[in-house]
């Protein structure tokens, strides 16, 4: 059985054995994890919204 997958030209495009299929599935899972990590990094880098009004700016100096 031969299975064609979409992949970069540096990777083989035909999978002929069970172990090759397992490697392809593992590679796909790794790409998903790396994509999620990249999205988390992008979201963390976005500027945080500024507070509205005086909330958090007033400091009580009474002791």
Image (cartoon, rainbow, N blue to C red):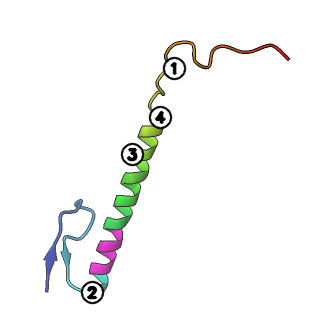
Q: Is residue 14 magenta?
A: no
Q: Quadrant of residue 28?
A: bottom left
Quadrant assignment for the C terminus: top right
- Report crowding for label 2: few under 14, some 14 to 19, many 20 or more residues within 10 A (C-alpha): few
* Disc sitting over residue 7 in the figure: none
Describe residue 48's horizontal placement relative to residue 3 as left or right: right
- Residue that numbered label 1 is attached to: 51
First in sequence: mark 1 or mark 2? 2
Part of the protein shown in magenta: 21-27
Q: Determine crowd level at label 4: few under 14, some 14-19, many 20+ residues with C-alpha closer than 10 A.
A: few
For discs 1 and 4, the disc positioned in front in the rendered view: 1
Quarter holding the N terminus is bottom left
* 32 up-or-down from 57: above or below: below
> Could you classify mark 1 by the number of other residues whose Cα lies within 10 Å: few (under 14), some (14-19), or many (20 or more)?
few
Instruction: Tell me where residue 18 appears, x and y as whole percent.
Output: 27, 86
Q: Which residue is under mark 2?
A: 18
Q: First in sequence, mark 1 or 4: give its number.
A: 4
N-terminal of the pair, mark 1 or mark 3, is 3
| Inter-mark Cα distance, 3 to 4 | 10 Å
For marks 2 and 4, give the CA distance: 41 Å
For mark 3, does the 10 Å Cα neighbourhood hold few (<14), some (14 to 19), or many (20 or more) residues? few
Secondary structure state at the residue bearing disc 2: helix
Closer to viewer: mark 1 or mark 3: 1
What residue did someone put label 4 on?
45
Task: Give the Cα separation between the discs numbered 1 and 2.
Answer: 56 Å
């Amino acid at each position: 059985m031969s299975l064609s997958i979409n992949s970069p030209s540096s990777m083989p495009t035909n999978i002929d054995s069970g172990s090759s299929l397992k490697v392809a599935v593992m590679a796909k899972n790794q790409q998903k994890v790396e994509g999620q990590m990249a999205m988390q990094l992008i979201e963390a880098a976005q500027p945080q919204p500024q507070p509205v009004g005086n909330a958090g700016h007033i400091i009580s100096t009474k002791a």
